[in-house]
């Protein structure tokens, strides 16, 4: 089968790989659509986030690894001791390895598992014609949710988990910093949660135009002072979501929230930022963060099925697996007009 395999920084090869068999407790999936994520870009451009050296304790794998953790497809084979899933089922994969035994897993906080890992970064992923995953990762897709939408469930879960984890109440005002895929899906999630006004802050007009289509008020922080603009128009924000993760956006997020407000960090910020704790203290405000998601895939799928989350709107391009490097991993770095690029695999 064809697979996009990470060998090293700037070295992702589309090559023939053997199709693995589903072992006990595992499910083989024929992939239909897969989405390219920011963490795939980090792995490709910076060589970070991939399982190198020792094998991952739960996947038993290390690089070279097939990328891809946002995907949907059809079940094609079951290993022994798998129940509740049938060959031919349309499914989406929640790509988190977790041990089920550590303190955090026992509390149900499996996204905090001490052996946490991602399919597609710590084990072979979905940028391939077939992928083998653990049966506990598999969720059913109803017939009225397309495979394209299925490929968007994972990043939407990140956004919805952040919104649900936050203090946002119906009718409150929101600012979302960063209008990339996660920022855009956070806008949709905040809208679904009943936010009355949503400000989207970015420096690229193309992304802000998409944000505006989703119902946000665009603020281009390269052209105007985002903090002043938002404060003037809104009178203060209840919850700011930080999906950009740079110093100016962090400063602005803290500055625009009301007394008692909240800043939620969703971005994986690689370098330490300064935080104005005095301003937080004076406002008695919360600064919090969320990691991935837990116990939320079925709800994301239902919200998409009901039309409450129109996630298709963040798709800006569909490509073939053969062209993943030029038309995906390279293009997403050079052309910021794109949000989510999907790879059509067996479709
Ligand atoms: Zn991702
Ligand atoms: Zn665990």
Image (cartoon, grey):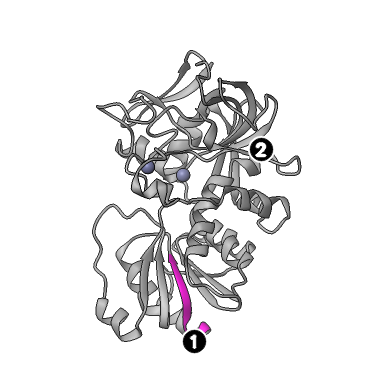
Rendered position, 42 above or below 29? below
Give the image location of residue 49, x and y in percent. Answer: 33, 39
Q: In this rendering, does residue 289 appear at all?
A: yes
Name which residue lies at 52% across and 83% down: 233
| Disc 2/disc 1 C-alpha distance (Å) | 41 Å
Most frequent secondary structure within the magenta stretch: strand
Q: In this view, does 48 lie to the left or right of 218?
A: left
- For mark 1, give the secondary structure: loop
Q: Give the residue at mark 1.
A: 235
- For mark 2, give the secondary structure: helix
Q: Is residue 66 left or right of residue 138?
A: left
Query: Residue 251 is drawn in which quadrant?
Result: bottom left
Q: In this rendering, does residue 338 appear at all?
A: no
Magenta part of the protein: which range? Answer: 234-241
Query: Residue 101 is drawn in which quadrant?
Result: top left
Name which residue lies at 47% across and 79% down: 237
Rendered position, 48 above or below 254? above
Give the image location of residue 4, x and y in percent. Answer: 46, 25
Name the mark nearer the viewer: 2 or 1. 2
The N terminus - image quarter = top right
The C terminus - image quarter = top right
Say which of 84 and 27 sits in front: 84
Residue that sits furthest to the right in the current view: 144
Q: Which of marks 2 and 1 is nearer the N terminus?
A: 2
Q: Give the residue at mark 2.
A: 147
């Amino acid at each position: 089968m064809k697979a996009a395999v990470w060998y090293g920084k700037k070295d992702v090869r589309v090559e023939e790989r053997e199709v693995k068999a589903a072992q006990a407790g595992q499910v083989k999936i024929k992939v239909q659509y897969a989405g390219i994520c920011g963490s795939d870009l980090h792995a490709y451009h910076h060589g970070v986030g991939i399982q190198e050296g020792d094998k991952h304790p739960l996947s038993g794998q290390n690089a070279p690894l097939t990328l891809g953790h946002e995907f949907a497809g059809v079940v094609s084979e079951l290993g022994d001791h798998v129940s509740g899933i049938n060959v031919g089922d349309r499914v989406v994969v929640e790509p988190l390895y977790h041990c089920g035994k550590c303190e955090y897993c026992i509390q149900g906080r499996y996204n905090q598992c001490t052996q946490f890992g991602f399919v597609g970064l710590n084990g072979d992923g979905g940028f391939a014609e077939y992928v083998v995953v653990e049966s506990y990762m598999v969720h059913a897709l109803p017939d009225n949710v397309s495979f394209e939408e299925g490929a968007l469930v994972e990043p939407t879960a990140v956004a919805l988990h952040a919104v649900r984890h936050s203090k946002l109440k119906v009718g409150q005002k929101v600012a979302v910093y960063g209008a990339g895929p996660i920022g855009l899906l956070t806008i949709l999630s905040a809208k679904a949660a009943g936010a009355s006004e949503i400000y989207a802050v970015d420096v690229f007009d193309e992304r802000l135009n998409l944000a505006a289509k989703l119902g946000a008020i665009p603020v281009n922080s390269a052209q105007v002072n985002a903090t002043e603009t938002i404060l003037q128009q809104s009178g203060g924000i209840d919850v700011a979501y930080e999906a950009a993760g740079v110093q100016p956006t962090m400063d602005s997020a803290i500055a625009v929230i009301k007394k008692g407000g909240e800043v939620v960090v969703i971005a994986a910020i690689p370098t330490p930022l300064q935080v104005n704790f005095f301003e937080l203290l004076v406002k008695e405000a919360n600064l919090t963060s969320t990691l991935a998601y837990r116990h939320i895939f079925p709800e994301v799928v239902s919200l998409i099925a009901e039309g409450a989350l129109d996630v298709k709107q963040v798709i800006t391009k569909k490509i073939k697996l053969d062209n993943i490097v030029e038309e995906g991993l390279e293009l997403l770095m050079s052309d910021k007009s794109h949000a989510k690029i999907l790879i059509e695999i067996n479709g």
